[in-house]
């Protein structure tokens, strides 16, 4: 059980490194659900990012009524 937890923690740490390398943690001023989703998916995908996996998330937000 401990070995599995260690592997998961290492996997997620590598995912954070991959997200950092892609510049997802730069302060852009306005964050969106798409940006947050992309960071989360990149972190979960972890080391797969170095194999060419490039996860992207899109969110459709409804326009306000006039």
Image (cartoon, helix red, strand yellow):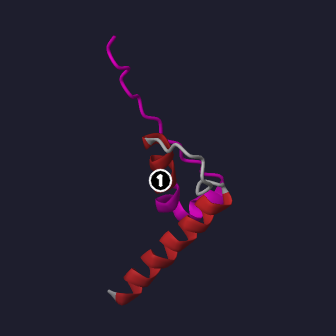
Q: Position of residue 15 (x, y in %)?
A: 54, 65
Q: Quadrant of residue 20?
A: bottom right
* Magenta-span inclusion, residue 57: yes
Nearer to me, 63 or 44: 63
Nearer to me, 28 or 41: 28
Q: Is residue 62 above or below residue 2?
A: above
Q: Position of residue 62 (x, y in %)?
A: 36, 23
Q: Which residue is painted at 66% across and 60% down in the image?
A: 50
Number of marks:
1
Q: Report the quarter where the C terminus lies.
A: top left
Q: On the rendered structure, is 66 left or right of 47?
A: left
Residue sticking out furthest to the bottom: 2
Q: Is residue 50 above or below residue 56?
A: below
* Magenta-span inclusion, residue 23: no
Q: Which residue is mark 1?
A: 41
Q: Quadrant of residue 22?
A: bottom right
Nearer to me, 5 or 30: 30
Nearer to me, 9 or 32: 32
Q: Position of residue 19 (x, y in %)?
A: 59, 59
Q: Which residue is painted at 47% across and 41% down in the image?
A: 34
Q: Is residue 14 above or below residue 53?
A: below
Residue sticking out furthest to the top: 66
Q: Which residue is painted at 45% across and 77% down in the image?
A: 9
**Badge 1 local density, few (<14 within 10 Å), some, or many (20+)?**
some
Q: Position of residue 16 (x, y in %)?
A: 55, 66
Which residues lie in the magenta part?
A: 42-66
Q: Label 1, secondary structure: give it.
A: helix
Q: Report the quarter where the N terminus lies.
A: bottom left
| Secondary structure mostly taken by the magenta-highlighted segment of the chain | loop
Q: Which residue is painted at 56% across and 46% down in the image?
A: 29
């Amino acid at each position: 059980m401990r070995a599995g937890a260690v592997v998961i923690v290492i996997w997620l740490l590598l995912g954070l490194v991959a997200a950092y390398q892609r510049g997802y943690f730069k302060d852009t001023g306005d964050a969106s659900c798409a940006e947050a989703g992309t960071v989360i998916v990149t972190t979960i995908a972890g080391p797969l990012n170095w194999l060419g996996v490039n996860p992207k998330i899109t969110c459709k937000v409804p326009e306000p009524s006039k």
